[in-house]
Amino acid sequence: MCFLNKFYLVIALLLATVILFSEVQATPFSLKSLNAHGVENSREDNDLATIVMIYQPNCSWCKKQGKTLSIAFKQCRHSVNIALVGTKGNARQLKKELKHYHKDLPAFIADRKFLRAVGGYQASPTTLIFTAQGDLIMKKRGFIAQEKLANAMSIVSKGACHI
């Protein structure tokens, strides 16, 4: 129970920091799709928060976290946007990696503009959480345990997403 209180405190502090320091914003982005249907944007215009995982080829931790994102996508796609953004590989390599994730999970190729907007990244997976307005409110490098990711999704979906 104490862990959950600390987690909610951290999320509250992150949100307060974002409100106080508006330069931590990322604009809504438009990226080239890796999916067969070829949609060319990664944030649906539906007033929902967006959770993005930056992945790369042959990343075992990305695949592990992708299992949680796949579950979340199945259960929460109407309460939070979830997407993958691939990097450090060409389109063929990144598409090949999609077999490890839910088949309908939107996936895109990172470009320099996107990476600059989110302040770059140091390792994969990197998880980004955007508000419904497109502001970057959280950036977490490395694997996030299912319980922590579930709590974050519940918070940004205002309690509508439970995995």
Image (spheres, rainbow, N blue to C red):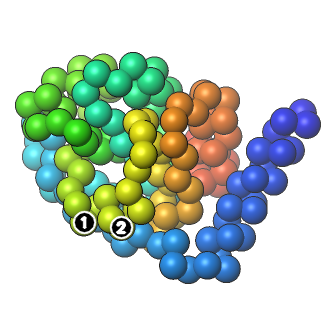
Q: Give me the C-alpha separation between circle 2 and circle 1.
A: 6 Å
Q: Where is residue 60 in the image (x, y as percent from the top left)?
A: 39, 19
> Which quadrant: the N terminus?
top right
Query: Is 96 rendered above or below residue 108?
Result: above
> In the rendered structure, are the residues bearing label 2 and label 1 in contact, judged by CB atoms less than 8 Å apart?
yes
The three-letter code of the residue at mark 1 reads Lys
11 lies left or right of 131: right
Residue at 58 percent of width and 52 percent of height:
157
The three-letter code of the residue at mark 2 reads Ala
Q: Mark 2 points at which residue?
A: 117
Q: Which of 89 and 98 is in front in this view?
A: 89
15 lies left or right of 49: right
Say whether residue 78 is visible. no
Say whether residue 13 is visible. yes
Q: Is mark 2 on a helix, strand or loop?
A: helix
Mark identifier at residue 113: 1
Q: Which of 66 and 78 is in front in this view?
A: 66
Q: Position of residue 10 (x, y in %)?
A: 75, 53
Query: Is 73 rendered above or below residue 80?
Result: above
Q: Nearer the viewer, residue 120 or 159?
A: 120
Mark 1, Cα crowd under 10 Å, few <14 / some 14-19 / many 20+, is: few
Q: Position of residue 99 (x, y in %)?
A: 24, 20
Identify the residue at the far right of this view.
Answer: 2
> Which quadrant: the C terminus?
top right
- Give the mark count: 2
Q: Which of 62 and 67 is in front in this view?
A: 62
Residue at 75 percent of width and 60 percent of height:
12
Q: Where is residue 56 in the image (x, y as percent from the top left)?
A: 29, 33
In which quadrant of the rendered view does residue 101 lie?
top left
Residue at 40 percent of width and 28 percent of height:
62
83 lies left or right of 67: left
